[in-house]
Amino acid sequence: MTETVEKTRNGAILYDKAIINQISDERFTPQGWLHAELLTGSLRSGGRGNTMFVGNIPRQFVLRHYMRGGLLGKLIKDTYIFSGADKTRPFLEWRLLDKLASNNMRVPRPAAARYVQRGTFYTADLITVRVPGIVPLSKYIEDNNPDEAFWQSVGAAIQEFHATGVYHADMNAYNVQVDNDGMIWMLDFDKGELRRPGTWQQKTLSRLHRSLHKIVGLNPRLNFRAANWEQLLEGYFNASRSA
């Protein structure tokens, strides 16, 4: 682990020198890169317009500005109450991702995190290494007709995260992603943490189930049916029993 923290004029930056050897506030803006591309997607998979691909191949990054969702997000766009650097959302997410990636979990490797303090509030940004060739589950089932083995592999992958105690606060059809080899990845660990086994495991599964139902409502031609969810659960519980 090569964690480095540098104080800035009104906040701090946490970064991995092995990935980005020099960092500045400019790197957390699209203008700080030669190439920047807004992440968009079908079925509302582009998030809240707060995520960009930056940098150039072979190593690209994902730059995300933290935005509030839900009803509160309509009133307070992107500010959070400051209660110490180590409790800021980007620092917490960076350190969780670093721990998971170091244990070969399929999550993006964190590059840099920043908070900018303004009085008792702060705004936040995160830079992760882009995982090549991954697409949201929502997009994958739009372009493919996955078989039973695929859905079982999705369940088994989720169980692998749960068995390690990984809580994902917003497991949905966009944050669950599929790579070129059909392997399952997990993105966006804002408010994620490591927990002991509990009811949260069923709640995150239910959240994903609701998300899949919602996107089928947006596009009934998506390849997801009730039987697929049963296959996913079969893969989850089979992996649980064999763990």
Image (spheres, rainbow, N blue to C red):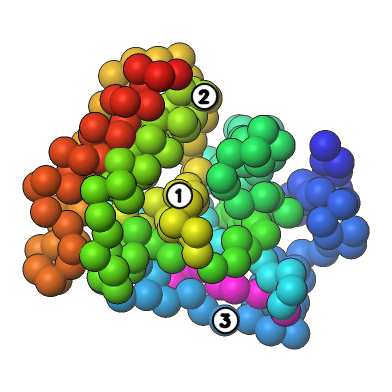
Quarter occupied by the C terminus: top left
Q: Which residues are magenta?
A: 47-56
Name the element at disc 3.
Answer: strand
Q: Which residue is mark 3?
A: 37
The residue shown at (67%, 59%) is 129
Callout 3–callout 1 Cβ contact below 8 Å:
no
The label on residue 164 is 2
Quarter occupied by the N terminus: top right
Q: Which residue is mark 1?
A: 184
| Dot 1 amino acid type | Ile
Q: From where the camera sits, is residue 118 visible?
A: no
Q: Which is in the foreground here, disc 2 or disc 1?
A: 1
What whole-number distance in Å separates the C-alpha atoms at marks 2 and 1? Answer: 16 Å
When the figure is inspected, residue 83 is found, relative to residue 81, above or below; the finding is above
Q: Which one is nearer the viewer's eye here, 139 or 15?
A: 139
Residue 122: x and y in percent read 59, 50
